[in-house]
Structure formats: structure tokens, C-alpha cells
Image (cartoon, grey):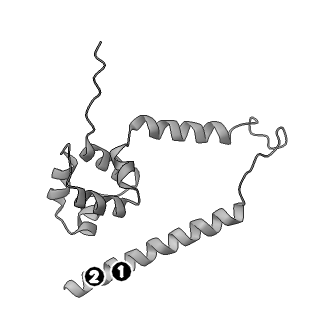
Amino acid sequence: MSTATKPKHIGRNISRIRELRGMKQEALAEAIGLSQQTVSSIETSETVDFEKLVQIAKVLGVTVEAIENFTEESVFNYFNNFYDNSSAGNGSFNNHPSNCTFNALDKVIELYERLVQVEREKVEFMEKLMKGK
């Protein structure tokens, strides 16, 4: 049994995160100013130029470290933990005390602000596209 670790495949990680975000290669390519074929090539590469990785991370809304350290297992763990925590009490909210440690209104405001920022970035991107034509 080998204890050697498998090298990180940055391109595959980019592909999986892009897919989880519901983004097509064409959209990612357009956002970073490359062709779809180039993005396809990046996604099959084990390593990616750091400058491109930074651009891709920004478009995908994650950090470079998130791309570098992405694993399928971590995604499943996240969703399993979310499901396990949300189903505590067997569907009855009266059977267990609430352990809420955050203000729900603050979270709604935070989400709204992130959505507004994403829309601003989309507008900026569209304006760049229009200026280029």
C-alpha cells in the first residue's frame, strides 16, 4: 500500500468548482478574456499560471487557496454536515433548543450586499465588452 500523495490537479479543481457554480466554460473564458478552447486546455492541466489562477478564482468567487486545496471529499463533508445540522430534532423545531449563534438579519444583509457586488461586477464586465466593440 503506497503512502505517496496524489499531486494536486489544479485544472480539474477549476473544472469542478466551475461546474458546482453552474458556469459553462464559455462564460469563464469570456470573463477572463480567453477562448473556450483555452479554458478547456487549462482544465486539463495539472498546473496553471498563477496570474491566470488569480483571475479564474476571482471569476469563480473563491480564493486561489480554495482552488488549490479543493477536494470532492470536502464538498461532500460540507453538504453532509449541513444536512446533519439542519435535520437535528427530526424535523420538529420544538424538540430541541435553538443554538443560533448569529443574527439572521445580519446574514440576510450580508447576502444582499454580496449579490449587489456581483451585479456591479457583471455591469462592469458588460461595459468593458461594449467598449471593446
Tag 2: residue type?
Lys
Instruction: Determine the image quadrant of residue 27.
Output: bottom left
Badge number at residue 102: none
Instruction: Identify which residue is drawn at 18% across, 45% down.
Output: 45
Residue 25 in the image: above or below residue 92: below
| Whole-percent x, y for residue 18 in the image | 34, 53
Looking at the figure, which quarter contains the C terminus?
bottom left
For residue 107, side relative to residue 128 (left or right): right
Q: How many marks?
A: 2
Instruction: Identify which residue is drawn at 45% across, 38% down.
Output: 74
| Contact check, label 1 and label 2, Cβ < 8 Å | yes
Q: Residues within 10 Å of mark 1 (few under 14, many from 20)?
A: few
Residue under pointer 2: 128
For residue 108, side relative to residue 99 (left or right): left
| Whole-percent x, y for residue 63 in the image | 39, 56
Looking at the figure, which quarter contains the N terminus?
top left
Q: Secondary structure at mark 1?
A: helix
Tag 1: residue type?
Glu
Q: Secondary structure at mark 2?
A: helix
| Whole-percent x, y for residue 41 in the image | 15, 51
Residue 22 in the image: above or below residue 112: above
| Whole-percent x, y for residue 98 in the image | 79, 46
Disc 1 to disc 2, how far (Cα)? 6 Å
Q: Residues within 10 Å of mark 2 (few under 14, many from 20)?
A: few
Instruction: Determine the image quadrant of residue 81.
Output: top right
Q: Residue furthest top?
A: 1
Residue under pointer 1: 124
Instruction: Identify which residue is drawn at 23% across, 61% down.
Output: 51
Residue 90 in the image: above or below residue 3: below
In this orientation, which residue lies closer to the viewer: 39 or 3? 3
